Image (cartoon, grey):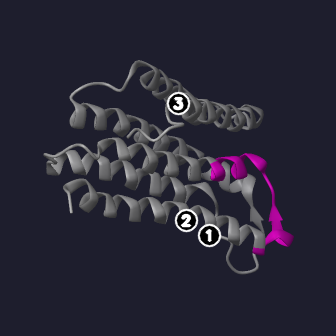
């Protein structure tokens, strides 16, 4: 077994747990549908968190040719997957007991942490390129990182509900463009 195959097991487990976290959130909402106050941006962000986890796993295949892994290099990649898991934990509320599940209330209670975690993921993604490849991401990739960082920061600073509704849609469009332009094919 090569080093990447060995190390990617732990990364895959954590990303799998992140996806499971969101799917369990959706499962809970389905079971609590009669007592759920829907706020559609939360649903969009939940889907986007799954996409972020899958895209992260997909893009990590590009690191398979690294032969000389260091603990620092692996730690940066591990930190990014952990941040994705924590983002997933914030995306949807837990629907327990008989209480009303208010998605809007959940969103605004956790929005600062959610968008801060997105910023962490973006920062660590850039750091990962610097540590593993000794260079910044490709210019188009770096431009998307900058746009995602600006949107995440605006999600913390701007409180207006209409803005957050537009932000969810814009993030969905941007993530679709990001994947469509840079990650359609597995880099083999």
Residue 4: which disc? Answer: none
Q: CA distance from mark 1 to mark 3?
A: 26 Å
Question: Where's residue 126, x and y in %?
Answer: 34, 32
**Dot 3 crowding, Cα within 10 Å, few <14, some 14–19, many 20+:** some
Tag 1's secondary structure?
helix
Look at the image and say whether residue 32 sits in the magenta stretch: yes
The kind of secondary structure the magenta stretch mainly shows is: helix
Residue matched to label 2: 21
34, 60: nearer the viewer: 60
Residue 148 belongs to magenta span: no
Q: Residue at x 30, y 43 (%)?
A: 63
In this view of the protein, which residue sits in the foreground, 155 or 68?
68
The single residue placed furthest to the front in the displayed view is 188
Element class at badge 2 = helix
Image position of 170 (left or right of 139): right
Check the picture and name the quadrant holding the N terminus.
bottom left
Looking at this view, name the residue that lies furthest to the right: 34
Q: Which residues are magenta?
A: 31-47
Tell me where residue 49 appears, x and y as whole percent: 57, 50
Q: Are marks 1 and 2 in contact (CB under 8 Å)?
A: yes
Q: Earlier in the sequence, mark 3 or mark 2?
A: 2
User: Where the C terminus falls, by quadrant?
Assistant: top left
Tell me whether the residue at label 3 lies in contact with that at label 2, contact meaning CB atoms closer than 8 angstroms.
no
Mark 1 residue crowding within 10 angstroms, few (<14) / some (14–19) / many (20+): some
In the figure, residue 73 lies in which quadrant?
Answer: top left
Horizontal side of residue 21 vs 126, given as left or right? right
Residue 5, given in percent of the width and then of the height, sits at: 28, 58
Measure the C-alpha gap from mark 3 to mark 2: 23 Å
Marking on residue 148: 3
In the drawing, what numbered circle is on residue 24? 1
Residue sitting nearer the eye, 175 or 22? 175
């Amino acid at each position: 077994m090569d080093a990447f195959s060995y190390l990617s097991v732990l990364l895959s487990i954590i990303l799998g747990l992140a996806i499971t976290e969101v799917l369990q959130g959706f499962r809970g909402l389905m079971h609590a549908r009669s007592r759920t106050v829907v706020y559609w941006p939360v649903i969009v962000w939940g889907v986007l968190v799954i996409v972020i986890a899958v895209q992260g796993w997909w893009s990590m295949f590009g690191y398979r040719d690294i032969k000389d892994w260091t603990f620092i290099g692996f730690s940066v990649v591990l930190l990014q997957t952990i941040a994705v898991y924590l983002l997933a934990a914030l995306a949807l509320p837990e629907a327990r007991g008989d209480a009303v599940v208010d998605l809007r209330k959940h969103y605004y209670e956790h929005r600062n942490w959610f968008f801060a975690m997105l910023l962490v993921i973006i920062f660590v993604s850039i750091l990962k390129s610097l540590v593993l490849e000794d260079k910044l991401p490709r210019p188009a990739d770096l431009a998307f990182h900058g746009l995602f960082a600006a949107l995440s920061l605006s999600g913390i600073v701007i409180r207006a509900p209409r803005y957050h509704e537009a932000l969810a849609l814009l993030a969905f469009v941007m993530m679709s463009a990001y994947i469509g332009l840079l990650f359609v094919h597995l880099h083999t």
